Amino acid sequence: MSDGTAKTLFEKVWSDHLVKDETPETPAILYIDLHLIHEVTTPQAFTLLREKGLPVRRPDLTLGTMDHSTPTTPVRSFKDLAVVGEGAAKQVVAMQDNCKEFGLELHGFDSAHRGIVHVIGPELGATQPGKTIVCGDSHTSTHGAFGALAFGIGTTEVGHVLATQCLLQRKPKTLAIDVSGTLQSGVTAKDVILAIIGKIGVDGGTGFCIEFRGNAIEAMDMEARMTVCNMSIEAGARAGMIGPDETTLGYLLGRLRSPQGPDWEAAAKRWLTLRTDAGANFDKSVGIDGSTLQPMVTFGTNPGMVIPVTAEVPDANGDPSFRKALDYMQVTPGKPLSESSVDVVFVGSCTNSRISDLQQAADIIRGHKVAENVRMLVVPGSQQIKKEAEALGLDKIFQESGAEWRESGCSMCLGMNGDTVPSGQLSVSTSNRNFEGRQGIGARTILASPMTAAASAIEGRVADPRRYLQD
Amino acid sequence: MDAIRTLNSRTVVLPATDIDTDQIIPARFLTTTTREGLGADLFHDWRFTADGEENPEFVLNQPQSSGCSILVAGRNFGCGSSREHAPWALLDYGLQAVISTEIADIFRSNSLKNGFLPIVIDDVSHRWLLDNPGCEVTIDIEQSTLTLPGGKTVSYPIDDFARYCLLEGIDQLGFLQKHNTEIDQYEETRPWKP
């Protein structure tokens, strides 16, 4: 059916942002519609601007928050918030000063909209279909859930975007991942993306922009779609996208930065035209039957080392890197992870800290207690989510079960803000990386869905959430 | 960025696959506002024991690694976080290139902007380098070749523009700024505004 004019979602957004197309000698100049910034990957870029005497070209297309090195300890007032360590404190002050000096909107400690950068973009309605979105953070792929082309960049590139609102880019190849069927009860977006990474590998998406397609993806709400796109980078793909549809429009309608009135009608109409045309070609395609998927957990030190929660840890088969990962994790081939006792459970991060994630964890843990040997931390993705969860009484459910309820932030996902997993301890975490030491020096991380994390907190070992599901 | 034409060094070998940027420079060292000094914490949790002593089993701590500026690493080097602190730390430590069979996209992009060379070669040559640590090799940017001991040359792919920037020490921001008029025009004429 391909007539040569059929285009993919990616191709439409890419070509719509070309200030100058690529040639064999030079990369494309790609215009950026939204630049998200945070305290960790920007200070050196602002220094460069200052050295060169350059302004920020489009402060109106730049949006800042503080999330990575900020603490999540509960406080009565943000004045009391104690930033961990001198370096982190300096970084937070530098972010405030830089945003003030260059005239940028910052959702700092006093903002009701502060939160994880990849949570607040969509929440504010700043993330929209058809936009190009970048941030000095690899999980920028999250925003692709809306049909935006969104990817992580380094600090030098942050400087390029601040100064010129553009980036030099080579066009990536396209990879279609089709998830068919209906997911079983207890199987979530997190399980889907972990299964995909397990299938294609942690470098399976290198050089590609992924489009997630198929019945199982279309049936997901926006928060679930964000969870899927968020971990595109864990398969090596800088960006993952999903075609905008009525679900996308339903999420965005009425948000603070969404178009209003007649502008909304025009935008919504344009957004729906972005979907991949029938007959458009992808450079590569992969299919997965969603109906056969189980709740998934990682057993090694990268997100591709993943098995169904009920399965046994596979054998290294002579692969030294694999063997090293099993040794680090202190897991035994041939045994299920349910034999491993859990010390810490973390529900949070840009992957799984939205209201539906917290609701799913709360539904499992309601009426149960966190096992005696387990510390459970629940960290909402933004101050808005915190407020919404408290209005639903989720904070009480978690606290009554023995879990800690925190302020928003990246928290235990990356151990640089005071929230860490002690050395040698085993954590079941809803975050995105199980790399050695990611959650703290010597910490051992098992990635899982919010449901699996909550079930594991109750049992004090890696647990299948399906036995806690109510009819 | 300084111009670079060739790089000649003995190699140091880290055979592990999927070495992520959290291993290259753990997140807790990212609480900095400058680019300098990160080399002290390069591969921190592999280089040092829990009590802060140098781990004698880690290859960079061994005497034969002294003075080596080319790293040979397993497949998919630099995966994970987009932190540019990773190439900053490698360069600050004294390393100038990594040779692998695959290098993660964002790390590769960050490396090229700082003059750290991400070199991707074929499996057979890579296997030979893994098996022969400490051998002397030469990277020629202009020719896009890696020369092994004995004179065998292996070509590696590199984007023309990236090569040009390395050879001339070009700052890519300057290149973008030269297109300011086109950027203005794009902003004015695009059919919808963000």
Image: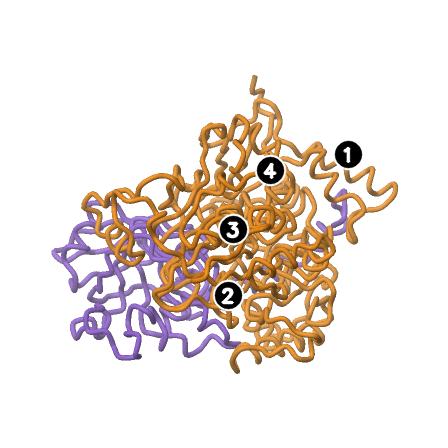
Chain colours: A orange, B purple
Same chain for mark 4 and mark 1? The answer is yes
Q: Which residue is mark 3?
A: A454
Measure how far apart labels 3 and 1 are at the Cα level. 40 Å
Name the front one of labels 3 and 1.
Answer: 3
Q: Which residue is mark 4?
A: A242
Q: Secondary structure at mark 4?
A: loop
* Residue A287 visible in the shown view: no
User: Marks 4/3: CA distance?
Assistant: 28 Å
Distance between the Cα atoms at labels 4 and 2? 35 Å
User: Is residue A73 something that shows in the picture?
Assistant: yes
Residue designated by label 1: A269
Residue at point 21%, 75% (across, down): B66
CA–CA distance in space, label 3 to label 2: 49 Å
Q: Chain of mark 2?
A: B
Q: Earlier in the sequence, mark 4 or mark 1?
A: 4
Amino acid type indicated by mark 4: Ile
> On the rendered structure, is A230 left or right of A16?
left
Q: Name the residue carrying label 2.
A: B171
